[in-house]
Image: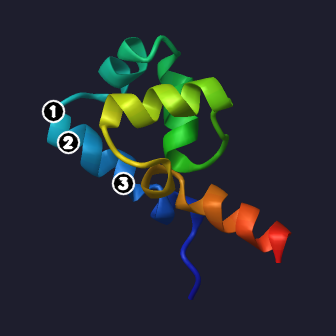
């Protein structure tokens, strides 16, 4: 069975736990609402390019790991 977007974005929860921050704290640190962060974390929405770079920096991980679904989507379009 293919992984859902939420499954593929499980890394967010893992990284938040590693940093010991809540969704609210991560959202505040990134200067976005908790709802916006939650929607991105669960795959219901995607970040802007600027926010994506802030998230990459905040979590200290490559964008390909944070957003594997977006990388997959982009590579499908290029095929």
Image position, residue 7 (x, y; %):
47, 65
Q: Give residue 42's position: percent from left, percent from top.
A: 52, 48
* Residue wearing tag 3: 11
Q: Alpha carbon of mark 2 to alpha carbon of mark 1: how far? A: 5 Å
Few, some or many residues within 10 Å of mark 3 (<14, 14–19, 20+): some
Q: Which residue is mark 2?
A: 17
Neighbour class for label 1 at 10 Å: few (<14), some, many (≥20)? few
Q: Secondary structure at mark 1?
A: loop
Residue marked by disc 1: 20
Counting residues from the N terminus, which is met first, the one under dot 3 or under dot 1? 3
**Residue 49 on image: x %, y %:** 66, 31
| Residue for point 50% across, 34% down | 38
Quadrant for the N terminus in the image: bottom right
What whole-number distance in Å separates the C-alpha atoms at marks 3 and 1? 14 Å
From the viewer's side, name the closer residue of 50 and 38. Answer: 50
**Please, which residue is most extreme toward the bottom here?**
1
- SS of the residue under disc 3: helix
Residue plotted at (27% across, 38% down): 16
- Left or right: 68, with 25 as reference point: right
Whole-number angstrom distance, CA of label 3 to CA of label 2? 10 Å
Density class for disc 2 (Cα within 10 Å; few <14, some 14-19, many ≥20) is few
């Amino acid at each position: 069975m293919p992984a859902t977007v939420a499954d593929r974005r499980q890394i967010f929860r893992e990284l938040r736990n590693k940093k010991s921050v809540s969704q609210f704290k991560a959202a505040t640190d990134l200067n976005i609402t908790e709802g916006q962060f939650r929607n991105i974390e669960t795959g219901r929405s995607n970040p802007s390019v600027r926010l994506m770079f802030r998230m990459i920096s905040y979590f200290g991980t490559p964008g390909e790991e944070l957003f594997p679904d977006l990388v997959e989507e982009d590579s499908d379009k290029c095929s």
